[in-house]
Amino acid sequence: MKPMATYDLMESARITNEWFGSTAKAMFSHPAFGLSLNPMVRLTAAWGEVTERSFSRMAMKPDWEIDTVVGEDGRDHLVEMETVIAAPFGDLLHFSVQGREEAERKVLLVAPMSGHYATLLRSTVASLLPDCDLYVTDWHNARDIPVSKGKFDVEDYTLYLVDFIRHMGPDTHVVAVCQPAPLALAATAYLAKHEPEAQPSTLTLIGGPIDPGAAPTEVTDFGASVTMGQLEQHVIQRVGYKFAGAGRLVYPGLQQLTSFIAMNADTHATAFFNQVVNVARGTASDHDRHNKFYDEYLAVMDMTAEFYLSTVERVFKEREIAKNVFTVNGEHCDIEAIRDVAVMTVEGANDDISAPGQCVAALEMLKGLPDDMKAEHLEPGAGHYGIFAGRSWRNNIRPLVLDFTKKNARSNRRREAA
């Protein structure tokens, strides 16, 4: 049985480092050092400020910070967030734009559950709001969910998506980013078999591992090289007493963050050092480029152990989605049953997480879907983050996605057929 002490030790280390930072900032910012010419005084105070901010952000859920959107009339319209469906492991959020005509597209943006909050898609949400009636999946931090709420694995995740799509209706356009792409495809297949009338109009899959074996990366190599027993032994921890989910088995966000940073350690170390120098010089600001990025990047959340382990085993190791043998509650999610949902895939040529070939593999699996309802796009020079939140998304990919949804809206297809 896993003890809670290990989880508490990680949290204690985070709090201690935050305290070290705040102490250094307070001590070396004291007026007594005001006349000192020693540059180390100012650098130490700056180090404390950057350290305190960094470690404090690891325990915070960022705000969406989307208050207004410009409408076609040129006016700013207030944006209100409302929870349409509240569930133990995730909510369906609606970004309601006040005072404008109803948008022609109803879009469900499926955020990844891969260590970061849904706010990682803030810029994606902001770019879609002017043209869409937008809904977003807002997954909860597993450490805050009591054990009494039960388990949450890839099958439960898929059923959550089924419920969300069913609630929004058949004119919904689903856009799944990264990790949820294969499960969004499975949810659509589930509806195609059980409730064909509830299927979405379109499904856009962005940088997702539909077939991880199609193009190996460090992520897929890691999944293939470790055993499930090793993962359960070394990365799964039990939530400590401080949180509502005390006793729940999770893959801790702090442990995930260590892996994220280790993949590009030199880059992060350089960014941290440069920010310390900028703070010491007085050229940094609260919302500068560094802080905007790392306030989001460092904010991590725990995943339930069963979700993480079932994702590695069933999506990456066994490749159940790619082999079209994925089941939910014993029911086969037959991807070939999808015949009335237009599907588009988007990949980045320089994506080192879901390499080109992994996502577009979905189109070959859709044997029952006419070719004129399939589309694919490979963005030159774009990495993983860029295909949904960078310049490539804003200038090239977003217009393609909007055109695809407009062309393949079920209502438009019916009018053309009539």
Image (cartoon, grey):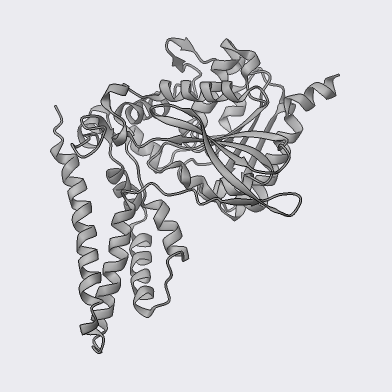
Rendered-image quadrant of the C terminus: top right
The percent position of residue 103, horizontal first and vertical second, equals 71, 38
Judge by depth and name the residue closer to the eye, 386 or 215. Answer: 386
Which image quadrant: the N terminus? top left
Q: Is residue 110 above or below residue 131?
A: above
The residue lying at 45 percent from left, 21 percent from top is 320
State the residue at coordinates (20%, 32%).
Answer: 233
Q: Position of residue 397 (x, y in %)?
A: 65, 46
Nearer to me, 31 or 237:
31
Front-most of residues 198 and 382? 198
Q: Quadrant of residue 273?
A: bottom left
Q: Count the marks: how many?
A: 0
Residue occupying image coordinates x 63% and y 44%: 128
Q: Is residue 318 above or below residue 103?
A: above
Percent from the top left, x then y, of residue 382?
56, 51
Residue 348 seen in the figure: no
